[in-house]
Image (cartoon, rainbow, N blue to C red):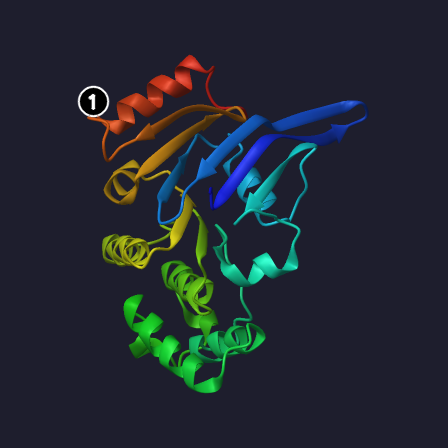
Amino acid sequence: MAIISFNNITKNYKTGFRKKKTALRDFSLDIHEGEVFGFLGPNGAGKSTAIKLLLNLIFPTTGKAEILGRRVADREIKKLIGYLPENPYFYDYLNPIELLSFAGKTSGMDSLKIRKKTESLLNTVGLWSERKRAIRSYSKGMVQRVGLALALIHDPKVVILDEPMTGLDPIGRKQVIDLILKLKSEGKTVFFSSHILEDIERVCDRIGILVNGRLVRIMDIKSESLTRPLEEIFIEEVEKAGGARE
C-alpha cells in the first residue's frame, strides 16, 4: 500500500475575471513506506501546491490525495504527519524548549516523553546549547532547525518537508541530511522538495521532476545508474517540458 498517494489531481486557481492558473495537471504519484522521495522542479512548477494539497490546506479542483489509505481530510491522519513549511513562523518570544513543550502537549504526549524527545531533537539539530534563547534572536538557519525539531516532536510516521535546506550553512545541511537518513532507518516515510540537487542525490531513493504542474519524470536513483549529473538531467527535462512557468 502506498503511504502517500496523489490520484489524478488538477488544481486551478482563479487569477481574475474568467481567468485561471493551473498549478497541477493530472498529477498522480505513489510514495511507499520507508521511502525518501525528493520532489524537484523550477520555481512555479507546483511543488508547494502539491504539498499543501497533501496537508489539506488547499483543495484539489479534481482528483484526491490520501495518506495511509485515508483521505487527507481525515483529522486522525494529522497525528501521524510531521510538517516543515518553507518559511516557518513561530511565536518568537518563546524559546525552543517552550515551543516543543507546547507542541508535545497538543499532540497528547506526557511531560517526561516531551522532555526526553526535546533534548534528543535539539541535540540532533545542534541547538541544545541555545535552548534558552528566544527564537526571535535566532538566525534564519536556526529557525529552520527549530522547525525540523517541531515537525518531529510527536514521532510522526510520515514527514513532509518543503525546502528543508533553506537558509542552512554546510553544517546545518549535513545535520538535516543525517536526520533524514535517521528517519529512513527508523522506517519513516519522508517526502520533501528541494532545489539542492546534491542533497537530493545523497538521501533519496526516488525523485520526481515536476514542470509546469506536470510530473515529467520519476527516477529510482538508488538502482538507476546515473551516467550524467543529476543537474544535467534535471535541466534537460525542464527544457523538454517547456521551462518554468512565471
55 relative to 5, above or below: below
| Residue name at image x 47 percent, y 36 percent | 30
Amino acid carrying label 1: it is Arg
For residue 194, what is the image quadrant? Answer: top left
The location of residue 37, given as percent across then percent down, is 38, 41
Q: Quadrant of the C terminus?
A: top right
Which residue lies most toward the bottom here? 112
Quadrant in the picture for residue 174: bottom left
The answer, for residue 94, to whether it is visible in the render is no
Image point (24%, 53%), residue name: 170
Q: Position of residue 199 (x, y in %)?
A: 27, 43
Percent position (x, y) of residue 210? 46, 28
Answer few, some or many: residues within 10 Å of disc 1's Cα (few below 14, many 20 plus, some between 14 and 19).
few
Viewer can see residue 81: yes
Measured from the top left, where is residue 245 in percent x and y? 53, 24
Relative side of 231 to 59, left or right:
left
Residue 134 or residue 207, whichever sits in front: 207
Which SS class for mark 1?
A: loop
Q: Residue at x 26, y 38 (%)?
A: 201
| Above or below, 7 relative to 34 | above
Q: Looking at the image, which residue sits at the far right?
A: 17
Q: Which residue is mark 1?
A: 228
User: In front here: 23 or 184?
Assistant: 184
Residue 202, above or below 80:
above
Q: In which image quadrant can residue 24 be found?
A: top right
